[in-house]
Image (tube, helix red, strand yellow):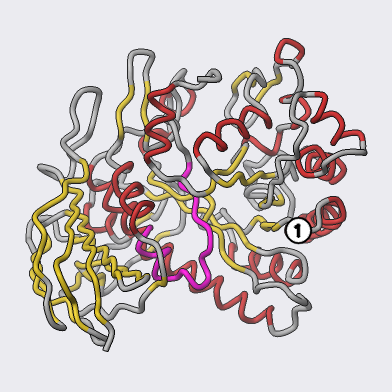
Amino acid sequence: EDGFRKDVLKAAKELNVTIARYPGGNFVSNYHWLDGVGPEDERVPRMELAWARLETNEFGTNEFMKYVRKLNTEPYFAVNMGTGTIEEAQNWVEYCNVREGPYYAELRKKHGFPEPHNIKYWSLGNEMDGFWQMGHLNAEDYVKKAREAAKLMRLTSPGIKLIAAGSSNYRPDANPDAWNRAVLAELKDVVDYIALHIYVGNPDDNYYNFLSTPLVCEERTQIVRGMIGEVMQNAHRPGRDPIYIAWDEYNVWYRARTGELMTGTRALEEHYNLEDALVIAGFLNVFIRNADIVKMANMAQLVNVIAPIFTSDEGMFKQTIYYPLQLFARNAHGTSLDVFVDCETYDTEEFFVGLGEQTTRQRNVPYLDVSAVYRDGEVVISVVNRHKDKAIATDLICQTGEFTGSFEVFEVNGPDVKAMNDFGKEPVKTVQKDNVKAKGTRVTYTFPAHSLTMLKGTIKQP
């Protein structure tokens, strides 16, 4: 359909993706958007330096817009702040958002798109503090370039939302807090979000260490929350919201980071298991618990490359990480509730959060990781049981009303924590369990070992 695989399009639609980021990622710091517009037979292939590939430019701005419109998804563009110029960024905004008149708006119309794309969200580069980035900048140079790019972009399209590139460099010799503090201090009157990234893994095959990694994401969220609160004291933002956090890259990524799995013809293709899915569910719980400050989260990526959808020429399958993402996207809407959790805990060993990154040691990690949302009398409670071997029974207590009717119960689980989906087999998926009767202020439920459970019920307010 319009050159897109129908099976993949269907699976992507069923994920209920609310916002999709384009074109990257490290890719964007050597990407020039003009290469990807206009007649396809006139587009020039380019060396893609971040991942050592040939970029054909067959899929560009307008193809992406066709795709997200089919998905009913909000587009989010990242501009090239590495090898690109601030004028190039401004021209792209003009191409996408200005109806008619200036050169690039008319060029879009010439390319067959008479109406503007109206891109609301724009990121000012990607991971610019990383030495691996094409055109890497120090904090002082980045904020100068970002400020001037923002000026031009907003003059072109005043209603856009701008996202600053927060730190993604958590190597032992790096200082991510210094970068984030400098970016927020200098761009506090300019940007609407600061972007953070996290990738975690389990190279040491330590289940309990790995299952605690979303709490590192929560720690980093709290640190940046504090920085935002500090700079907002002296910010001048008339009529605008405070700065929010966008976790616009997060995922499990550690197997496909070396050798052929990093550079081969099917590079960066992780094959996920149940424990990976539980970590993703933990991330989603973190985002909901911090929904007052985390207003955007983007799993990287969508198809094949560290992705929930895996394809071949013959078919496709939904990876284990597909199911928690789908379950939350469909159901976890409303106001985030402050949930008190009292359960057994454990301590981790010291371990690397991601490959080559700083180490952490987590203490008092709750076996039950919980978030909850409320909307129009309905409560949705999401619980990850981190315990590898033990089902945990607990009381769900409502302090501001009574449960009524019954809970719908959805569970993501599998025969063991290493269970993987593949072509033609799906041991890990969402299963709807029997409803649980709910009456009064207290309901007891037993959460199976190594599982994600989502409970949907109604609350009668006093």
Residue 444, x across and y down, in percent? 9, 73
The C terminus, quarter of image:
bottom left
Q: Is residue 296 magenta?
A: yes
Residue found at x 33% / y 24%: 316
Residue marked by disc 1 = 159
- Horizontal placement of 31 versus 329: left or right? right
Toward the top, the furthest residue is 41
- Horizontal placement of 448 versus 277: left or right? left
Residue 442, x across and y down, in percent? 13, 80
Q: The disc labelled 1 sits on which kind of residue?
A: Gly
Residue 421, x across and y down, in percent? 23, 32
Residue found at x 32% / y 62%: 350
Residue found at x 53% / y 48%: 19
Helix, strand or loop at disc 1? loop
Toward the bottom, the furthest residue is 462
Residue 445, x across and y down, in percent? 10, 68
- Horizontal placement of 127 versus 269: left or right? right
- Horizontal placement of 93 versus 242: left or right? right
Q: Is residue 262 above or below residue 388?
A: above
Closer to the camera in the image, 393 or 108: 108
Q: Which residues are magenta?
A: 284-300
